Image (cartoon, rainbow, N blue to C red):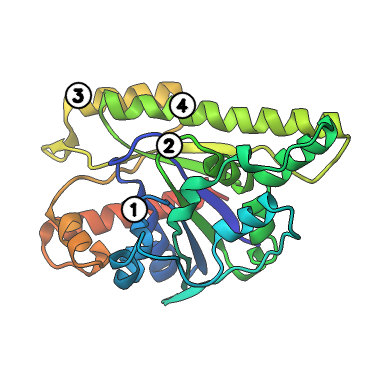
Amino acid sequence: MAVVVGFISEKGGVGKTTACYHIAVALSRYEGKRVLVIDADYQRGGISGRFFPRLIETFGIGMPAGTTLFNKFQQLYSASHQTPDIDIHPCGGGIDLVPADPRLSTVSVDKLPSTNNIRENNMLLLSHMKTIAFVLGGLRQNYDYILIDSHPEVSDVMRSIIYVADHCVSPVKLDRQSSIGVATVIGEIANVNNDIAMIRRSLGVEDGYRDTRFSGAMGMMAREYGEELKQSEQLEYNRLRRSGEIFSNYVTEGDGLRVAAANRQPVFDVPGANAAKQAAQFRALAKEFLRVCL
């Protein structure tokens, strides 16, 4: 049964998609895990473009082909019968992908059918948060890990990701401006857990939900001096550790990852000393990920 992990952040440009992509590849290539990646970043679709460059070239142009997560929310809005079917694209090497759909930007509980019945309204709110979980219900047995890359903002899509996730992690640059968003992420996870508890009590239902756990910030694009974090970044790392969990391993900035992004390939396949260093860092981070996200 797959472990579901949401990669969430309030701030963009912190390496969230890069982390999700490389951990997916490392889990499959080096740890022998079957991985499903869900691209829920409705603005950029970055992971979809890493696996299938043609998807990013046409992202936002016309209507995406096939059945996507957006269609599952749309069924709920139109009061249709919700079905779990969704299109999955094999990427090779033990990784599958549910591609991004820019129409996810329109997902909102405001579009739910309104009623004068409080109990029915709460049931609809619960169904909205459970939509991604409903889709993944029959798929979890096919994978060891399901990784969800989210859009960097607090939204109703993020809340649905938090609901389905066993763990959430938050990639972050080790600077004050970026790391402030980690507290927001932790707070939103708590909000979802508390909201679900309240709705379940009011409805008298038990659906097997277990509180989603924040399993740590991930230091990305870190800067070093003499193979150690620079002082300002070490201070931010220590501050994050005091406020919550943070992974011991981090990934440094450098040309290795930039070349990998430009070539739409993992840094593990890029030649050069800097790429080799970052590849080793991601392999270490993936091993720690396995220990933390059980």
Q: Is residue 245 left or right of residue 188?
A: left
Residue of label 3: 232
Q: Is mark 3 on a helix, strand or loop?
A: helix
Q: Which amino acid does label 2 sit on?
A: Glu
Q: Which of marks 3 and 4 precedes in the sequence?
A: 4
The amino acid type found where label 3 is placed reads Ser
Q: Mark 3 and mark 1 in contact (Cβ < 8 Å)? A: no
Where, by quadrant of the figure, is residue 102 drawn?
A: bottom left
Amino acid type of disc 4? Thr
Q: Answer yes or no: do the residues labelled 4 and 3 have beta carbons within 8 Å? A: no
Q: Where residue 258 sits in the image (x, y, percent)?
A: 17, 55
Q: Residue 256: image x %, image y %? A: 16, 57
Query: Which mark is first along the chain, 2 or 1?
Result: 1
Is 116 on the left or on the right of 246, as rendered? Answer: right
Front-most of residues 227 and 116: 116
Report which residue position mark 4 lands on.
184
Residue tagged by mark 1?
A: 44
Q: Give me the C-alpha separation between circle 4 and circle 1.
A: 22 Å
Identified by mark 1, the residue type is: Arg
Q: Is residue 64 above or below residue 13?
A: below
Decide which of tag 4 and tag 1 comes sooner along the chain.
1
